[in-house]
């Protein structure tokens, strides 16, 4: 059994995954503390992880019906993410591994999102294009072989796709995180009511789109529910089209006819429908494996050479700039 911890952002997660990729427990505790700030506050996240981590671990063992005696390998997210938040899960995992003199696997968070596809029962094997879109990252990757570093085909130059949803939602008076709320508002709107930029470059860029919404919102009467719905629908369409354009290019350039989604934005119905219309084999993991979770970290841990006790004790986390997908 692999025990994995994930604390890179605002979800405190622990999972137990068997050697064949079957998920015995996947516990996710989403921190509520950030809602009133309209975004994740790093220091608040780190403190909340500290409060939650023991309970989340206990819950994972209880759900899996096993104990530390059954664990053969401990894994944790090393980065990228918020350093203070990462440290809680990483230090806890190292301590548990060290206490039992177990091997330890430091996992890259983005490799984890890709490896969600390898978990049972719905296994999707390479080669495929992966679109990872969340509040922290936006990547189009060519995944050719399990465990080998994927090729980055497009990345974001500024905001992440989920961040674009969240900031747009905020301008339309919706709460945080706003992606799902914006999608609900957009359901009654006309996606062609307003024109928003999607960018034509190689990479993703959502900063201009956000500014365009700000200016448009200033011109219009936001007290009108129809105007707000039309704005939400048009804005959502622009994000979806920006993502779809890079995915289409990635499929074309690599000749791969298979696509896997990951990250919280994969929950978006408009995005799923748009990518479903591409005529390629589309893999949508269950939602709890798309958003941040520790089962995906365990899955990625299978593909790296574990470090023997005690060689991992002085290992540190990274915020960004390291790891296979830097
Ligand atoms: O993967 P995730 O849970 O955490 C991060 O690593 O960020 O993704 C959260 C992001 C948030 O930005 C949220 O607004 C977005 O995913 N999201 C959505 C939807 N549900 C969540 N965006 C668009 N439509 C949705 N239905
Ligand atoms: Zn993530």
Image (spheres, rainbow, N blue to C red):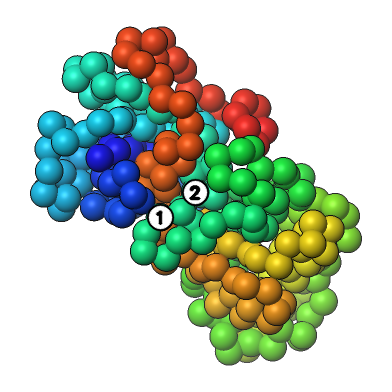
Q: Are the residues tagged 1 and 2 within 8 Å (C-beta)?
A: yes
Q: Which mark is residue 174?
A: none
Between 24 and 210, the residue placed more toward the observer is: 24
Is residue 11 visible in the rendered image? The answer is no
Residue 218 lies, with reference to residue 306, above or below; the image says: below
Question: In the displayed structure, would residue 2 be above or below residue 312?
Answer: below
Residue at figure coordinates x 41%, y 45% from the top left: 299
Residue 267: % across, % down: 50, 69
Left or right position of 259 against 269: right
Where residue 19 sits: x, y (%)?
32, 44
Q: Is mark 2 within 8 Å of ligand 2?
A: no
Residue 99, image x, y percentages: 19, 17
| 1 is higher (above) or lower (below) than 185 | above
Identify residue for label 1: 119
Q: Nearer the viewer, residue 129 or 110?
A: 129
Q: The residue tagged with tag 2: helix, strand or loop?
A: helix
Label 1 residue SS:
loop
Left or right of residue 165: residue 21: left
Could you tell me which residue is drawn at 42 percent across and 65 percent down?
122
Residue visible at 68% across and 74% down? Answer: 280
**Which quarter of the rendered picture does the N terminus lie within?**
top left
Residue 296 showing in the rendered view: yes
Categorize mark 1 by other alpha carbons within 10 Å: few (<14), some (14-19), many (20+).
many
- Residue, x 65% and y 50% (percent of image)? 143
Query: Where does residue 110 sit, x and y in percent of width and height?
Result: 55, 43
Which numbered tag is attached to residue 115?
A: 2
């Amino acid at each position: 059994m692999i025990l994995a911890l994930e604390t890179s952002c605002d979800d405190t997660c622990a999972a137990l995954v068997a050697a064949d990729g079957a998920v015995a427990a996947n516990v996710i505790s989403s921190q509520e503390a950030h809602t009133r700030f309209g975004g994740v506050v790093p220091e608040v996240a780190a403190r909340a992880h500290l409060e939650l981590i023991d309970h989340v671990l206990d819950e994972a063992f209880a759900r899996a019906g096993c104990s530390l005696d059954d664990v053969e390998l401990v894994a944790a997210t090393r980065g990228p993410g918020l350093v203070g938040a990462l440290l809680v899960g990483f230090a806890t995992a190292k301590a548990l591994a060290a206490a039992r003199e177990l091997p330890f696997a430091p996992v890259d968070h983005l490799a984890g999102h890709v490896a969600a596809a390898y978990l049972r029962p719905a296994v999707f094997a390479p080669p495929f294009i992966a679109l990872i879109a969340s509040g922290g990252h936006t990547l189009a990757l060519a995944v050719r072989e399990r465990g080998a570093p994927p090729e980055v085909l497009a990345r974001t130059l500024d905001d992440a796709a989920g961040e674009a949803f969240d900031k747009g939602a905020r301008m339309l008076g919706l709460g945080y995180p706003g992606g799902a709320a914006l999608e609900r508002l957009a359901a009654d709107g006309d996606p062609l009511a307003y024109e928003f930029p999607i960018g034509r470059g190689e990479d993703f860029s959502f900063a201009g789109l956000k500014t365009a919404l700000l200016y448009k919102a200033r011109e219009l009467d936001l007290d009108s529910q129809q105007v707000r719905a039309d704005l939400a629908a048009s804005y959502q369409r622009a994000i979806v089209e920006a993502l779809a354009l890079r995915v289409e290019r990635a499929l074309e350039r690599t000749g791969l006819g298979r696509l896997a989604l990951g990250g919280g934005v994969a929950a978006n119905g408009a995005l799923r429908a748009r990518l479903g219309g591409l005529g390629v084999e589309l893999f949508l993991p269950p939602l709890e494996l798309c958003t941040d979770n520790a089962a995906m970290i365990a899955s990625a841990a299978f593909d790296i050479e574990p470090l023997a006790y005690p060689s991992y004790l002085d290992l540190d986390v990274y915020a960004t700039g390291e790891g296979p997908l830097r």
